[in-house]
Amino acid sequence: MANLTGIGGEAAAQTSSLPLYHKAIDWDALYREYPVPDVYARSVYLWSADRVRDLQNRRFMALVDIGWKNRFYQSLWGKAGVAPGDIRSIDDIEKLPTFNSDDIKNDQAEHPPFGLLPGYESLEDHLRTTPSRLQSSGGTTGKPRYTLQGITENEVNSISAARGLYLQGVRTGDILQIPATNAMASLPWAYSKACNEYLGVLPVTTGSGVVTPTRRQLEIAFDVGVNCWMSFPEYLTRLAQAAKDELGRDVRELKTKMITTFLGPDTEGTLRAHLESLWGCPVYDNYGVNEVGHGALECSHRRGLHFMEDLSYFEILDTESFKPVEHGKVGNLVATVLYRKTFPIIRYNLRDLGRMLSTDTCDCGSSFRRMDHFLGRSDNMVRMRGVNVYPMGCLPAVRSDPRTTGEWVCEAWDGVVDGRAREELTVHVEVRRDAGAVDGLQAKLESRLKNDLGLSVGVKLVDEGQLQTVASLGEGKAKRLIERRAAYLKKS
């Protein structure tokens, strides 16, 4: 119930029975628990590792209590033989089983539409007290997964995006263009809300290139004086080229102060260097996923991505044994989201490949652990002639030669060699219009890819722009694998 003063200065209070969003929680308490960007940057972000661990432990134990009341976790943990008394601190987290996106999809299929994981008995009753938002994954690995966010989840998701922007140099008065559509995915909502409600930054929500054509995106940017961008590398590259081809202008005229993006496995820095050359500004990497929100970010020193340790606890587990990997080894990222009460996330195997870079205090003063760039997806792996191949692993090779646009798509197909069936992988690589002679490029890329992937693959050079539709460039995460193998298509 909310008491509202009557119109025209009437003294009598009016009562609403609606679950008004801005009356549904204690906002001061929310901001004490989850500080806004500038407060965060001089407090929690600089805490010692021990103090951060104590905070994680407190939030984790509260989350486990929620889990035991949740029918999804009651079933999952019960089948694993875990009892409530077994979990006494975050040190016991490995006793809990992991789950993955397939479990979420199965839960939602068996208990439509949202499954048992959200944690309520009745959606109608839940909405009477908890104004909520429905989001979903992008569907790049199959049917999108629905995720419900209550007020805390919605606000902290935006606060975390605002923190990332602030730590990367965005300040009040800046103008951030967001070429991502405010639809079912949480990313554009989080960034536009972060700007509007937590930073005093003007969000320019142009949506994707399908919603607002690329030429118009650029015209808007030049008209209103956009000086910061949040977008994906593929579309940022396209914007820079379109400015030259369609407007006869250089995007560096915008005097962009920073770009925040998602670089993927840019371990050699070639993609970052390319974008910085095009735009004339620093480019910052981030990591996030639908159910987790903003998981990790680069600070100004850009020596790894800081896990946002007060909001999520990350583990890196071996892809087969599910045991913790040694420091510096690659494994699956497993996340426990410490702030989610609606749709709680406890030991969620993201099947995203990661590697721990450092547990030492960064030069920025933060003791938050740092991981390498996102290295690809383990469930997007191609098993090819006995070798595990990750399509995102092609990035360093493709970006190693300036004659390419840096775009590629892997095609898996059934071939025949010496009369015997053999699985083949062809990497389609775009060549720049102004590349000039491409003599030796195919052989160079095939040699580099064989070294990087551990497998002989074919390379097919294609004209610039040819992969735009195939790879869904500019519409979020690019599609890097096309399966044409009969065995795979039959299973699908």
Image: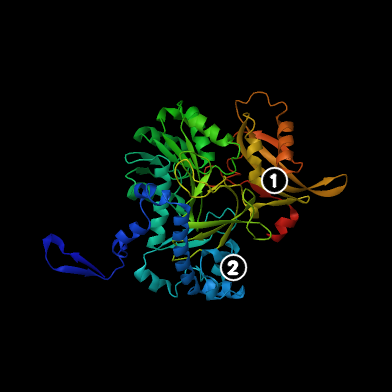
In the picture provided, is 452 more to the left or to the right than 33? right
User: Looking at numbered disc 1 in the image, what kind of residue is underneath it?
Assistant: Glu
User: Looking at numbered disc 2 in the image, what kind of residue is underneath it?
Assistant: Lys
Question: In this view of the protein, which residue sits in the foreground, 210 or 274?
Answer: 274
Residue 487, horizontal then vertical, whole percent: 75, 57
Please, is residue 292 above or below residue 228 in the view?
A: below
* Colour scheme shown: rainbow
The residue beneath circle 2 is 95
Q: Residues within 10 Å of mark 1 (few under 14, many from 20)?
A: some
Query: Does any portion of residue 475 appear in the rendered image?
Result: no
Q: Residues within 10 Å of mark 2 (few under 14, many from 20)?
A: some
Q: In the picture, residue 58 is in which quadrant? A: bottom left
Question: In this view of the protein, which residue sits in the foreground, 312 or 50?
Answer: 50
In terms of secondary structure, where does tag 2 sit?
Answer: helix
At a point 54% along the width and 68% down the height, the residue shown is 108
In terms of secondary structure, where does tag 1 sit?
Answer: strand
At a point 71% along the width and 39% down the height, the residue shown is 449
Residue 411, numbered label: 1
Q: In the picture, residue 106 is in which quadrant? A: bottom right
Query: Does any portion of residue 145 appear in the rendered image?
Result: yes
At a point 50% along the width and 32% down the height, the residue shown is 276
Please, is residue 413 above or below residue 256 in the view?
A: below
Marks 2 and 1 sit apart, C-alpha to C-alpha, by 40 Å
